[in-house]
Image: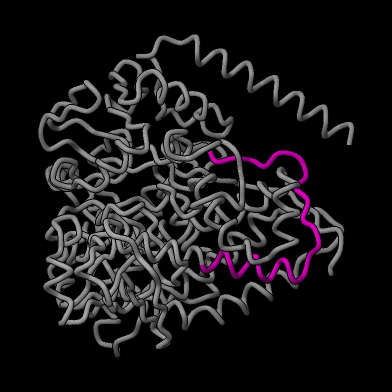
């Protein structure tokens, strides 16, 4: 499967991903700028903040409980904000495009 | 060279003695909150032992000095779990591990000389409330009111200013003679940034440093405040100065500094005096000691680890990684404290409801189960950003990106100017259980590039 990270400067990076990983881990493994994953994927640092377009909303699921708490203390949060460590890769997400908020 | 070597041998002997002494003590007597352990580095042995033998540690009243009983979390996983569970570990009215304040001390900032004992006691009983010592939902209101001051956009706008100041500071340093790096560089740069963040007059920037230094230290000879009276007076001075500026900024156009943001926040009209000074105190300390001591720490660590220094100078792309590794190794704030909201069991120990729980970041950052070879300073280690120094969860450091920015910029400018910076002797370390830092550090810069 493939996922695409669009950066704030408009450039996009399409990378290969395997099933069952955190989307944040896919980004970190591919050195996507603006995704740091400082806390190791526990929704505790908000350094993997992305915007998910409406068409991918259902497939990526709802915000988790710790993610909701963390997003109350994060810069630039919008309705489509997610922490990418709380999104699991699967075939259903093949072709996913997210916008990296950066920090 | 001979002198340096014999000093190193002497240090090694002192450390071996401290290690032996700490391992010989009965566990229940270990009091990691004793500030005497920090200038010597003894706390590293205490935490090493606790992580292995008693990772969730209770210090009873009789062994706590004047702190009163408290619990210590020393393993990474327990610290992270507590930091991210504000329902079980409340921050209401508590930031750090401290002795209980007297009513006079608690009321000092607000006391114009006419307060009754009952009024003072009411202030003490409420505890210090601030964006760092509140739970949701108040926490979001207070943090949200000022967070824009260090937003990514605001930081991008500040970078050229910080770079220009860093350059001017470095160009004014003496070459070939000893000077105090802490005062001339670390304090100077961070005080300028702090004055910008508060939009406070630059010529009075060292007042901010002084207020911060006093607020985080116990008074005593050689300390920032010599007596409790001096400390109380300084805290009152800070409160009066800040309240005055906030009042004036309520009538001024919106700007991005912390004081304007707070003045114009629709919520701040309802803040208590204690909350106002609490929030500003957190922003003051957050922007002062932390970055300052990490800058000084990087100078010390690179001097004492010549191989790491060589790596950095051969490859300046390692600056961001070196910055993160320094923040981990230094852990400029050793801990944060919380209060258990109900009985909670961790690793077989039951922490009773209401007890204080200290999350020792300085210990978790060296937990070998999480950080391989944690005592070593390795600027190109794997995952250098994974450290506890900024905390995790809703209270995570608000200014972490600004801290990293200042560290990165000062090092880019130093590498461009100086082929070496040598630390002379041992620096004077802070006598504090909370601020892990350096009071003075003598260095020599032999020549420019």
- Position of B202 with respect to B264 (left or right) is right
Q: What residue lies at 58% left-to-right and 19% top-to-bottom?
A: B18
At 53% across and 66% down in the image, what residue appears? Answer: B191
Q: Based on the displayed image, in which of its 4 quarters is residue B271 positioned?
A: bottom left
Question: Residue at the spot x=61%, y=51% of the render?
Answer: B379
Q: Is residue B328 visible?
A: yes
Q: What percent of the width, then of the height, locates residue A75?
A: 29, 72
Looking at the image, which is closer to me, A33 or A22? A22
**Percent from the top left, x then y, of residue B146?**
29, 71
Hey, which quadrant is residue B430 in on the image?
A: top right
Magenta residues span B405-430
Q: Is residue B385 or residue A73 the one in the foreground?
A: B385
Display colour scheme = one colour
Q: Position of residue B439 (x, y in %)?
A: 60, 46
User: As displayed, is residue B388 above or below residue B262?
Assistant: above
Q: Is residue B148 above or below residue B301?
A: below
Q: Position of residue B343 (x, y in %)?
A: 12, 29
Q: Is residue B80 left or right of residue B399?
A: left
**Residue B323 versus residue B4: which sits nearer the camera?**
B323
Task: Tell me if residue B28 is in the magenta stretch.
Answer: no
């Amino acid at each position: 499967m493939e996922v695409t990270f669009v950066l704030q400067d408009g450039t996009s990076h399409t990378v290969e991903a395997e099933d069952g990983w955190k989307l944040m881990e896919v980004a970190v493994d591919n050195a996507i700028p603006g995704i740091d994953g400082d806390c190791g994927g526990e929704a505790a640092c908000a350094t993997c903040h992305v915007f998910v377009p409406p068409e991918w909303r259902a497939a990526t699921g709802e915000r988790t409980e710790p993610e909701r708490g963390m997003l109350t203390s994060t810069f630039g949060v919008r309705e489509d904000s997610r922490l990418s460590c709380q999104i699991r890769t699967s075939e259903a997400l093949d072709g996913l495009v997210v916008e990296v908020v950066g920090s | 060279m001979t002198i340096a070597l014999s000093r190193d041998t002497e240090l090694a002997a002192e450390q071996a003695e401290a290690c032996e002494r700490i391992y010989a003590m009965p566990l229940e007597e270990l009091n990691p909150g004793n500030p005497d352990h920090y200038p010597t580095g003894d706390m590293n042995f205490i935490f090493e032992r606790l992580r292995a033998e008693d990772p969730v540690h209770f210090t009873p009243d009789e062994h706590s000095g004047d702190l009163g009983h408290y619990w210590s979390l020393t393993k990474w996983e327990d610290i992270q779990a507590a930091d991210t569970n504000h329902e079980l570990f409340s921050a209401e009215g508590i930031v750090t591990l401290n002795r209980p304040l007297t009513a006079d001390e608690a009321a000092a900032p607000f006391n114009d000389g006419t307060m009754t004992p009952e009024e003072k006691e009411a202030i003490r009983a409420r505890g210090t409330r601030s964006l760092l010592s509140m739970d949701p939902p108040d926490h979001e209101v207070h943090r949200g009111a000022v967070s824009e001051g260090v937003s990514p956009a605001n930081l991008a706008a500040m970078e050229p200013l910080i770079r220009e100041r860093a350059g001017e500071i470095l160009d004014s340093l003496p070459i070939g003679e000893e000077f105090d790096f802490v005062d001339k560089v670390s304090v100077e740069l961070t005080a300028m940034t702090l004055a910008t963040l508060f939009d406070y007059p630059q010529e009075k920037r060292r007042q901010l440093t002084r207020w911060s230094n006093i607020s985080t230290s116990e008074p005593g000879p050689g300390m920032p405040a010599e007596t409790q009276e001096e400390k109380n007076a300084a805290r009152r001075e800070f409160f009066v100065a800040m309240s005055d500026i906030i009042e004036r900024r309520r009538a001024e156009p919106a700007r991005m500094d912390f004081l304007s943001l707070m003045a114009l926040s629709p919520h701040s009209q309802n803040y208590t005096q204690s909350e106002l000074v609490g929030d500003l105190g957190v922003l003051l300390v957050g922007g002062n000691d932390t970055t300052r001591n990490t800058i000084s720490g990087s100078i010390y660590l690179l001097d004492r680890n010549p191989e790491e220094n060589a790596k950095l100078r051969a490859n300046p792309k390692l600056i961001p990684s070196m910055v993160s590794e320094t923040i981990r190794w230094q852990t400029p704030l050793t801990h944060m404290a919380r209060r258990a909201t109900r009985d909670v069991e961790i690793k077989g120990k039951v922490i009773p409801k209401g007890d204080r729980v200290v999350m020792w970041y300085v210990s978790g950052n060296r937990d070998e189960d999480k950080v391989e070879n944690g005592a070593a300073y390795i600027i190109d280690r794997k995952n250098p950003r994974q450290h506890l120094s900024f905390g995790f969860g809703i209270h995570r450091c608000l200014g972490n990106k600004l801290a990293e920015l200042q560290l990165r910029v000062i090092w880019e400018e130093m590498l461009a100017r100086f082929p070496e910076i040598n630390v002379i002797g041992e620096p004077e370390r802070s006598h504090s259980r909370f601020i892990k830092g350096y009071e003075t550090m003598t260095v020599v810069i032999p020549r420019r590039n």
